[in-house]
Image (tube, coloured by chain):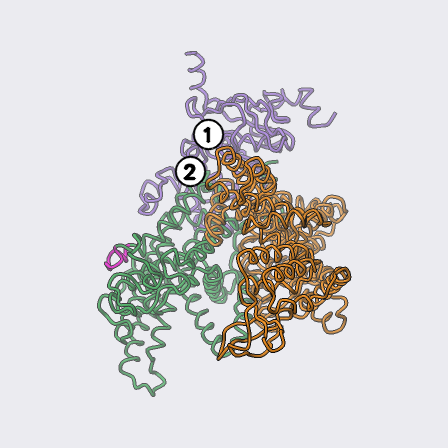
Amino acid sequence: MISGRFLRLTGTSGLILLACLLAAAIYVPVANQFIDPGSPFHVNTASVVVFGKYLCFAMLALSIDLVWGYCGILSLGHGAFFALGGYAMGMHLMREIGPRGVYGNPILPDFMVFLNWESLPWFWYGFDMFWFAMVMVVLVPGLLAFVFGFLAFRSRVTGVYLSIITQAMAFALMLAFFRNEMGFGGNNGLTDFKDVLGFDLQADSTRIGLYLLSIAALAVMFLICRAIVLSRLGKVLIAVRDAESRTRFIGYRVEHYKLFVFTVSAMMAGVAGALYVPQVGIINPGEFAPANSIEAVIWVAVGGRGTLVGAVIGGIGVNLAKSYFTGALPEIWLFALGGLFVVVTLFMPKGILGLISHWRRRQPPPEPAAETGAPSSTAAEERA
Amino acid sequence: MNTLHKELTRTVLYLDGISVSFDGFKALNDLSFVVEPGEMRAIIGPNGAGKTTMMDVITGKTRPDVGSALFAGQHDLTKLDEADIAQLGIGRKFQRPTVFESHTVRDNIVLSLAGKRSVFDTLFARAREEEADRIDRVLDTIRLADRAGMMAADLSHGQKQWLEIGMLLAQDPSLLLVDEPVAGMTDAETVQTATLLKEIARDHSVVVVEHDMSFVQDLGVMVTVLHEGSVLAEGSLDHVSADERVIDVYLGR
Amino acid sequence: MARPLLLILQRIALVLVLATALIGGSAKAQSGPSVPDLVSRLAGADFNETERVVEALAASGDASVARLLEALGDGDLYYRRSDNAVFIATRGGEGYLLTDPLTGASAGEAGRREVAKVRVNNSLRRAVRAAIGTLTLRSPDPAIRIAAAQSVLKSGDPEAVEPLTEAIAAEQNDSVRAVMERARAAAILNSDASDAVKIDAVKTIAAKSSQDTRAILLAASNGASEALGSAISDAVRRVEGDLALWSAAQNVWYGLSLGSVLLLAAIGLAITFGVMGVINMAHGEMVMIGAYVTYVVQEIIRNHAPFLFDVSLLIALPLAFAIAGAVGMAIERGIIRFLYGRPLETLLATWGLSLILQQVVRSLFGPTNQEVGAPSWMSGAFELGGLTLTYGRVWIIVFALVVFAVLVLVLRHTSFGLQMRAVTQNRRMASSMGIRTNWTDALTFGLGSGIAGVAGVALSQIDNVSPNLGQSYIIDSFLVVVFGGVGNLWGTLVGALSLGVLNKFLEPYAGAVLGKILVLVFIILFIQKRPRGLFALKGRAVES
């Protein structure tokens, strides 16, 4: 049976989540392979891919919840970390194509041949090796987050200022990746992947494998996040969120904690991106778009920030809704999404999970701690 | 030189010639001020006298334009940041109570306990027996033992003030800076707070900034009057309240 | 855009036609024997007779003979044996294709035997060339005279010295004469004139600094004597120095132009974010609303009152201010006031709002770019020294500065400005002094949004009017406000202009996109160095 320690690690809602993931891990492949396509219980392969995609979004949401929900850092640049992880994976998949490209060049990807490049740029070296690409999936977003966070947190850029510059970072990266000269395929990005580790990416079995891998990755990430959040470090993170200067005045180096959680979270976003790319079969600079990052934030808000489980619910739920609306009522989707931003922030600051616990306890949840005193002047009062 | 050095090392806090200005406004003007070990000192002064700015300088939040600030005669406070200074042993209570609202009372104390503060230490930290004892003692001192499991957000205003003082105690600092601890408290709470502070002062140096004269009276300690960023008078409350200049400042000319 | 533009072009063309007709008419009145008579004399003429005809044609000053003279020089001029009619003939089909030498109209074909060439020798060819030069240099149309002089300036044909000297003596128009003098100097440099004359010519040429000047001088330095060579290299150095200065000045201009766009986009934000501390991600959509108001106003004018087109922007300005301002106030009352003190939630809610506003506009007007025309007083360009300035850009800079100045005055010298500052500095105190703080909040937000709308009117002139218009400005605007220093209008001004100039100075080295990226990286690093921006307010600040 499940031991008490494990239950403590997952929490009740976390346990339910993991059970659901396990169920999905068993049901979907079985329904895909063994249930008759005519049956309503059948899951076609396209849907498997879509579910796999949502799982990656859930991972991205999880990573955002870790920094925003627990440490109060509203990053509008996590889509960029996601995309960087995706590009690292995409670069490996490009190298895997080998001589099977349109131009048949054994080393150079097609777009480089097209641009008349003579040789592989140095930053493409090593990506032919799977392990190297996997290290880069984590390292590149992690390093960027580390450097960016080091500078930002050291100079105490906080709140909306941090949000704005993370957004500017994503924007700058998007512009950069749009350039052909950058060596990442410019506008078109990286695509036409053939296989990974010898498995054909178009094959049902590979798709189901990637889907299962995404479930496993999501579960592991969830447990890592829980472990961090439950540790004393997690308590410090919440302390930073609630009262940053108090935390500092009892001797914690707030910037180190922020840097740690920001970097870990960026790495998780990178892994999510790396799992996303082989499933959708393309990565392009559009993934860096600031709108993507901010949309991912709303998944977390919808599910309930600072709960981890809520982030997963939001990441999957909002995207299910998006698929439905963009298919059935494309005009309505942006109204719905925009309305979601407004409604969630105005009426359900704790998200779906907050509502559920509210109903269950039948008592008002404690007010969220005010993050600042905007139009009134706290600083002036403190100094007087 | 030698005697001066001895003089300095004997002090807990030594401020000399500190000036700070904001956009031309002199918040502190050649302020000099000494706290001896084990001493409790009350600081009074009208609004804008520079009380909070002084605390900011001592805790590393604000850098002085000129002047020196030494802790225990050897640590230059003007070169250290808030976390360094807190780890050296200076605790600060804000004017408005700031506690970690989404943590339990107990966790608030746990986080404040003296100990290693690095990221990885906290990541792998385990609750220890001796910690539990210390936490219980602190909770007793601040009279919140029966509320240990409550969310800090659900405490009353006065209880939050005490919790914050408790957090300072858990830090085990050699100097406590307490900014207006009884602001917004009921009379009963005010009296209890005075008792609490006197208890604490038995084995800590304490600097209390306060407006409430009866509270200062209750404390019965040496008083420093600040005005326009520098020391106007120093002595017992009776002594300073007899001072002509202090009366001018408080009652208007 | 196409219709008004066409209208303007037609108008311009009409004016030109009238002007040339007047000048041409007066010039023709003075001429001696008619041009067709002269032309007919070419049939079967000997060399001397041909030369006399050429000179007479040149003296006629009729530009239409240029084609004929060119054909003569090239040996393409023929006459028909049967009737002595003169044609320009080119080989084609069985024999020759004929065109009328004066009108250029096709005149049928002729067999190889039916026509004979008007014969030319070398001295005649020289005369023809000189005649062409004289002809165009004497043209009644100043534009043609300038073009003729400029072609000499480029070719540096030494044969042109004579005709140019004569043309200069006869020239009445100062600006045409200046070009002619430069052309003559260029011709002299290629002739066998003495060094002293040539050094004078170098001075004349170097008086105006341009790439052409530099090229002419460098070409002339080949095989020049020592004295001339050093004079030329001095001149080249001076010209190059000037050119560098002008190109820097042009960059500054482009930079200020970009900066004024940034300023327009950011200035409303300096109120809502800078002064109130409200982070409004739908700010860009207020700009977009302003642009669409302009579009609608122009549509109505086009359909109902085309004569008002030139003032369409002036009509759009107050409307854009009112509509964007009203939308802003509605947003403040409806959403933002519930989120005061929670900037991150405000950010998310207003982002959602921006999506809704975009979709509303998309549903109403469609997703494609709408055409917004430029009134006549905003099109065209003029030269200032070595700079080319377009009227559109000049107006936008002026407009941005005017909006800024008005805003500063409103904030500083009106009671509304006073109340607004009072509320943002100490809400409770302001409220207890009888200021209706809620109302002030709404008005302040409306003011910021209205200014964004006004900016949209201006930006409709240089950007695509589409539902995405606002999004392209939102990041830039926030960076400008933060870079300049939150809560400081002057910081926004300096921030916008200096970022604009920085961007344009980077572009020549890094390219447009990389330049933009570098600016973004610069701002990100700058904010980390000085989180409060260029002109930080010390002490009190909007802290998050």
Q: Nearer the viewer, mark 1 or mark 2?
A: 2
Q: Is residue C124 placed above or below A352 in the rendered structure? A: above
Q: What's the mark number on residue C318?
A: none
Q: Using the numbered discs, state the Cα–Cα distance from disc 1 to disc 2 in whole angstroms.
A: 14 Å
Q: Which chain is orange?
A: C
Q: What's the mark number on residue A251?
A: 2
Q: Does the magenta stretch include residue B172?
A: no
| Residue C452 at least partly seen | no
Between residues B226 and A320, which one lies in front from this camera angle?
Answer: A320
Task: Indicate the chain on which mark 2 is placed.
Answer: A
Location of residue C451 by image quarter: bottom right
Spot the residue most to the bottom.
A38
Q: Which residue is drawn at 27% across and 75% down?
A: A203
Q: Residue at x 48, y 64 (%)?
A: A302
Count residues near mark 2 (Cα–Cα under 10 Å), then give few for <14, some for 14-19, many for 20+. many
Q: What span is colored magenta in the figure?
A: A126-135
Tell me what hue chain B is rendered in: purple
The residue indicated by pointer 1 is: B175
Disc 1 residue type (three-letter):
Leu
Spot the residue most to the left.
A198
Residue under disc 1 on the same chain as residue under disc 2: no
Between residues A141 and C91, which one lies in front from this camera angle?
Answer: C91
- The spot of residue C311 in percent (x, y) is 75, 62
Tell me what hue chain A is rendered in: green
Task: Indicate the chain on which mark 1 is placed.
Answer: B
